[in-house]
Image (cartoon, rainbow, N blue to C red):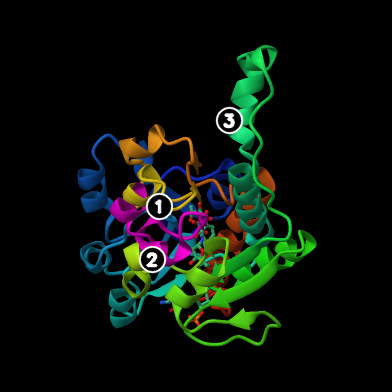
Amino acid sequence: MKRNLLIMSKMPDYFVDLADANFNTFKLWLQKNEDDYLNKIKNDIEAIAVFGGYKITPQLMNSMKNLKLIACYGVGYDAIDTIAAKDLGIRVTNTPEVLNDEVADTAIALMLCVYRQIILADGYARNNEWLNGEFPLTKKFSGTKLGIVGMGRIGSTIAKRAEAFNCEILYHSRTKKNVKYKYYGDLKLLAKEVDTLCVITPGGKDTEKIINSEVLDNLGNNGVLINVARGSVVDEEALIYYLENKLILAAGLDVYADEPKIPKRLFGLKNTVLLPHVASATVETRNAMGQLVFDNIKNHFENKSLISPVV
Ligand code: NAP
Ligand code: 8YV
């Protein structure tokens, strides 16, 4: 008998096709009235597959008495209340490692776009402005000092790439890691030392607004901020103020505090490159993430060990 899986929001076809072929799937995003639907199916649901940013609250978990697994389609699981899950005996899985390359590629792409003003230069070429003169000179990225906030799986993958650009790499995390780069226990001191600060920690309470005015002050008016972690890690109001007043040089952002809403004040800023949370968004990487979500659910239903459990 096929086991019952609830898919909370639209997910890539690769995963949905695998799920449809192997499980009895319930698709919340296709329903006219999601609350009525949830109420109707709540006792049938044994596992949930969920896109990274979708909030899974204790109330939702509590309402499903047969729910035993939440499989998150993303490495960051800050939208899932894992403490409540643990209390209720619900396991949680995520998708580590398979997206390291993609997110690191995106972080480096943001750095190059910001330093070399690639997006503005593209606009300049398309608008035929070259006919009126050369595009203004930009700033060299190779050989700059890069501070990585969060020297984990993705942070260390970014560092490897930055080495090829002859960057000097320094980092901050709560604990010193077994890496050759210089460790800074104090984030403000790291910010003072570097040209670029690249944030790649988890989201959630522990990292909330750790990039604040004090850190941005230390980064200074030649400093660049790259955020591929979570919007919550940066004090967005402070960042916008620092960008508007040129108190830091520029920013490259993939993530925001209230996605998919991007603060309107960022739209007009020429010293900012904006992406719509796409750091892992290639067909290859999203398929690999989908496969890992599927494999975790399959193992769970077959009473085998979970591949990437977080709870
Ligand atoms: P990871 O291997 O667990 O690394 C996280 C790093 O952050 C660790 O070095 C950890 O070290 C550090 N850290 C944790 N809490 C911290 C704190 N309060 N202050 C300073 N450092 C802290 O995770 P990962 O696989 O590299 O992924 C990192 C995060 O990237 C994810 O959780 C997600 O939020 C984000 N992400 C974003 C995208 C995107 O599309 N933009 C894609 C994938 C991942 P210590 O514990 O020693 O401090
Ligand atoms: C996804 C991410 O875009 O893995 C993460 O933590 O932020 C991204 O890879 C997101 O989780 C969508 O599911």
Q: Secondary structure at mark 3?
A: helix
Question: Where in the figure is residue 223, as x and y percent of width and height?
Answer: 51, 57
Question: Where in the figure is residue 55, as x and y percent of width and height?
Answer: 32, 57
| Mark 1 residue crowding within 10 angstroms, few (<14) / some (14–19) / many (20+) | some
Q: Which residue is mark 2?
A: 78
Q: Is residue 47 left or right of residue 126?
A: left
Contact between marks 3 and 1 (CB within 8 A): the answer is no
The residues tagged by marks 3 and 2 sit, at their Cα atoms, a distance apart of 34 Å
Q: Which residue is mark 3?
A: 120
Image quarter for residue 134? Answer: top right
The residues colored magenta run: 215-240
Which of disc 2 and disc 3 is earlier in sequence?
2
- Is the CB atom of the residue marked by disc 2 within 8 angstroms of ligand 1's nearest atom? yes
The residues tagged by marks 3 and 1 sit, at their Cα atoms, a distance apart of 21 Å
Q: Which residue is mark 1?
A: 247
Image quarter for residue 117? Answer: top right
Instruction: For residue 298, say whether it is visible.
Output: yes
Specify whether residue 158 is painted magenta: no
210 and 196: which is toward the camera: 196
Q: Is residue 215 left or right of residue 297?
A: left
